[in-house]
Amino acid sequence: MNQFQYNKANEPHSAVKLVAKDPDAHFLAGGTNLIDLMKMGVVNPTKLVDINHLPFSKIEKLPHGLRIGALVSNSDVADSELVKAGFPLLSQAINAGASPQLRNMATVGGNLMQRTRCPYFFDTTLPCNKRKPGSGCGALEGINRMHAIFGASDQCIAVNPSDMNVAMRALNATVHVSGPKGARGIPIADFHRLPGEQPELDNTLKNGELITAVELPYSAFNKNLSYLKIRDRTSYAFALVSAAVALHLEGETIKEARLAMGGVAHKPWRLSAAEEFLKGKMVSEGNFRQAAQIAMKGAKAYQYNQFKLKLAPNTLIQSLRIASGIAAS
Amino acid sequence: MKKDTIGEPLSRVDGRLKVTGGAKYSGEYKFPGLTYAVLVPATIVNGTVTAVDIKAAKYAPGVLAVITPFNAEKVPGYQPDAKKPVKGLKLFNDNQVHFNGQPIALVIADTFERATYAATLVKATYQVQPFETDFRKNIDKGVTPNAGKYKDYVRGEADAYKNAQVKIEQEYIQPSEMHNPMELHVTTAYWEGDNKVTVYTKSQGVMSSQRAIAAAFNLEPQNVLINARFVGGAFGSSLRTWPHEIAAVQAAKFVKHPVKLTLTREQMFTLVGYRPLTIQKIGLGATADGKLTGITHESHSQTAVYEEFTENAVNVSRFLYQSPNVNTRYKVVPLHIGVPAPMRGPGESTGAYALESALDELSYALNIDPIELRLRNYADIDQERNLPWSSKHLKECYQLGADRIGWANRSPKPGTIKDGDWLVGYGIGCGAFGAYRGHAEAKLKLMADGSINIQSATTDIGPGTNTAMIVIAADVLGMPAEKITFDLGNSSLPPAPTQGGSSTVSSVGSAVHDVCVALRQKLYTLQGKPRDSMDEIDYAAVIKEQNLPYLEISVGSESGDNAKNYSMYSFSAHFAKVYVHPLTGVVKIKNLIAVVDAGKIVNQKTAASQMKGGAVGGIGMAMTEEAIIDNRFGRYINGNFADYHVPVNADIPQIEAVFINKPDPVINPVGTKGIGEISLIGVAPAIANAVFNATGIRVRDLPITPDKLLS
């Protein structure tokens, strides 16, 4: 590990200032991802600004939703009675990720910032446009079994590894940030980005911007829901594919559906067309199959992830079956 | 009459030490002036190191030395004129690179962190040569190994299956699988003068480590002291002395300080062996009523360009079932990769996956129940060696396992039993592994208070060896286990074989048995009784009445000639019940039953634990484990614990171990045959066969990940 400077920030303003003026400075929260990347030489910050003492560790009830501080641990979010009552999908998604030890350390803000697990990104001897722009994409013609089927570019086919983000996307979260030019709210749909020509950028944060909280609007999506994650072992593995489903049901009629997928794109992938299709439809296997077919429009697979073209719709169907009560979880 | 204590469940005598952190492993010994060595891996696959720039590393904080091929002192055992040349990679002896990740330098510093940092500053330049790591592309370059016992084998007529009424011809793939013991490989070494070295290392055999290091540095074996008191799992990865262990000893000599060298988890993927990627072709032919008429088993395995590795991948097909015609062929394909090593159930587990899967396929082709098919081809003698079995109770294993798993509920038609969404399937897979016994010695000391200490230079890589030895001693001596201690894991103790090949209880247990018998005979003689008396002995009283401070006795123990008249194997039958989700391909193993004919079971409790551990290894082989190389770069792309999946607790069902527990009358005085390997051999095909029974999908390339089961 390279030498770096360690700074403990006592208030948000100074944290932002310290990072904004140094392009190689990073905020340090739980460190579960950043420290690993530093050990591997993937990220080499000159300066770490420890934000763990900033006042972002509360979960607060707002009139129209819930505000979760950026430093609340993943475990505390998943176990929160407020979250379990209002946003059980988020609870399920978080518990599907990592291990209890990691969830105890990892924060909400950190999880939003989690880097891809693409092996070419992690190995500094291999090409990766995300780690080293212009070096090429090792995965494009490499071992790309874990890689994207939606929204990739020929510069990068990596996926966002987070489970939490998938639920956040389905639940229309807003990411609140504070930066040198003040505070703003970023809809989760606009927070993560597709790789395009700049795969080095995972998100739309501007220089020095610090995540302070995430807000979730209350909705009727807290009764019929399922986060189904398919992976190579039963826990502590990244998703081959995951499907977050929340249904607002009236009897057997779907008033509204929220659908998002993980393990398929550079960002948590919302399935708007499939949601639109399900609106007003009856709960039925046939409708779920059609929705899954619609969801897969535009999917493109590579040499080793062809199976995702089948696994993705199947996982969505099964998650819909569970959310609607047709199948047991 | 003494009480029969063998087989009684006894908790591990060092269990408390292990769970409280009191057990000291090789990396936990501290010495004044201890320094830390970190390896620098090559980033090319094949070629030569033309220069190593060590300037920045050498002047980094805390660095004592940087060893490279250009400044290393010559290791005597690496030289062409060595008395006993050391096999394998000769680290820092020349500037050749044979695989990606091969160490090309070693940094020694005052802390691990400083050594790690300095290692990143070492810059090598290379002359790069073309390389080959792609097994499939190079399979035609397979060669018959130099070792004679891997010659082609033919009994009766070759490829007889081709003319059979019913035949199966299929290919089965075992991917590279890493041992990945929880404890990293660590070696700590310090020299006293130029001729004596003490080494704490992760070793399955302190005597073989002693021989290897003595040979490498041209020392008298007694001047090389090896300690491996506790070993945190090894699974075959510590059967040999690796180049990095010799490098640690070399470094300690160079800096004249104690040196500790710890491999990183990532380095464990390249430097300490693995189960080699193996592609096998099986041909089975049978009559319509299910009698095997021919078995053909051909296998290609990876090996390294710089060292040949071989294992018994095809041998299981020669003896497990009765067949007049059997032919096997085994080839290895040299590639620019690290050399493999035996991994629990070495060869046999790979071979049994293929044979037992093919036999299952044959059972469907014949429409005969898989257990019935095995019964119709039951081998009453070993046809390979034309010898009777010393003991074989596999039929009872079939019966017991079938009862426990609920085989009667199995449908002969795949995909027809459901529980909710889930498809339900049952499978069987059998295993066999040679029952071995080597020469072992034991020394016993009877103290004035009547307590006993026994010593032998065996090791305990996890099964609870000293607990088993104490059970054997307590049984022979007719005294409580609490009065007996057993010392192992040190090369200064009486010689014993390496812990491997399921042979420790058979070899060392026999020496312990014999030394205890010798003590009884000695004491009877001192008392003027016939030496084979069965009278109870008050050990403290005899010592007192004979006016002895203590009494010491040593024996060596090995097989008699009678053993040559028998074929000796342990056998296992594994049963799996699985649930498979038809939409997502997710497999839940609901139940695993391992039924074992391993002769007498010395300690039911630790033996059951060992069986469960082996079954977990089998689940990893079947379901999750595969080390993947990107052949464009010759480099593993999942060489870490996040991306290489060993099973987690949530993958493991209730595992039940059932022991036939009938002593083998031939192999040794205790009647034990060994369980280390057969606990794993046969597990993977049992699961794969159950998955087929559930889904109708035959997975012929492990591991069985969800993507392979999408219908």
Image (spheres, rainbow, N blue to C red):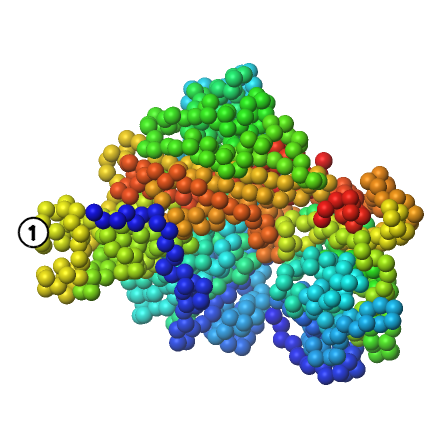
Q: Nearer the viewer, residue B160 or A223?
A: A223
Q: Residue at x 65, y 48 (%)?
A: A232
Whether residue B487 can be seen here: yes
List the single residue furthest toward the left: B528
Q: Find residue B480 and report its image quarter.
A: bottom left
State how many labels appear. Answer: 1
**Few, some or many residues within 10 Å of mark 1 (<14, 14–19, 20+):** few
Chain assignment, label 1? B
User: Residue visible at 34% across and 58% down?
Assistant: B489
- Where does residue B329 sit, x and y in percent of width and height? 48, 30
Q: Is residue B173 above or below residue A252?
A: above
x, y percentage for residue B206? 34, 56
Q: Quadrant of residue A101?
A: bottom right
Front in this rendered view, residue B550 or B421: B421
Please say if B604 is above or below A50: above
Q: Which residue is mark 1?
A: B528
Is residue A32 at least partly visible in the picture?
no
Image coordinates of residue B59 in percent, x first then y, are 53, 75
Q: Nearer the viewer, residue B122 or A42?
A: A42
* Amino acid type of the residue tagged 1 in the rendering: Gly
Query: Horizontal and vertical percent for residue B259?
Result: 42, 68
Tell me the quarter of the picture where residue A25 sits: bottom right
Horizontal side, residue B442 vs residue B234: left or right: left
Q: Is residue A168 left or right of residue A281?
A: left
User: At 13% across and 59% down in the image, what residue appears?
Assistant: B542
Q: Residue at 88% x, 44% y: name it.
A: A282
> A298 left or right of B27?
right
Disc 1 secondary structure class = loop
Q: Quadrant of the N terminus of chain A?
A: bottom right
